Amino acid sequence: MKNLYAICCVTALFFILSLSCKSDDTKMTVEKDVLRVGMVIKIKPEYIDEYRALHSDMNSGVRDLLTEANMHNFSIFLRQLDDGNWYEFGYYEYTGDDFESDMAKLDKHPRNIEWLKLCNPMQIPLDGYQGWAEMEQIYYNK
């Protein structure tokens, strides 16, 4: 009877794990919670070309620091709206376990500090914000 109970427990555990796993042809991995962050800020029109150059594929900037801080799929989009202002929309996925700690380390890293000294003067925070304004996620298509 104990063996039957153990077999049932193992079977149930495997079933529960399989529900929370993604599989492909080569492996099975447990999908981890992801914090998806969207944010917006204005950019001064006279800096658009320089800002684009700073973020080009040719400039590694702080990409490795973002990865170390568990920030993935970091993307920035640029658009001029009907009000005449230019806006940046940023998006990233955080996959770490301690967001506050990872962001504190990133904030203190000398190369990130220098990067922000370059980028921040090019931007105009929305009214009521000091920097990027986080956006409310209302939809996600998995």
Image (cartoon, rainbow, N blue to C red):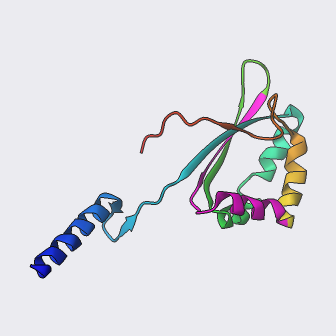
Q: Look at the image and give the residue range highlighted in magenta.
A: 86-109
Q: Quadrant of the N terminus?
A: bottom left
Q: Is 90 contained in the magenta span?
A: yes
Q: Is residue 61 visible?
A: no
Left or right of 59 on screen, residue 92: left
- Seen from the viewer's position, the closer of residues 64 and 29 is 29
* Residue 42 image point, x, y percent: 79, 33
Tag count: 0
- Seen from the viewer's position, the closer of residues 48 and 27 is 27
Q: Is 4 contained in the magenta span?
A: no
User: Which residue appears farthest toward the bottom when viewing the image?
Assistant: 3
User: Which residue appears farthest toward the top when viewing the image?
Assistant: 82
Please say if 113 is above or below 91: below
- Seen from the viewer's position, the closer of residues 48 and 112 is 112
Residue for point 91% across, 43% down: 121
Residue for point 90% across, 52% down: 117
- Seen from the viewer's position, the closer of residues 34 and 122 is 34
User: Which residue appears farthest toward the front when viewing the image?
Assistant: 1
Q: Is residue 73 visible?
A: yes
* Residue 119 image point, x, y percent: 85, 48
* Residue 45 placement: quadrant: top right
Q: Quadrant of the C terminus?
A: top left
* Residue 56 image point, x, y percent: 74, 52
* Residue 20 image point, x, y percent: 34, 59
Residue for point 72% across, 23% down: 81
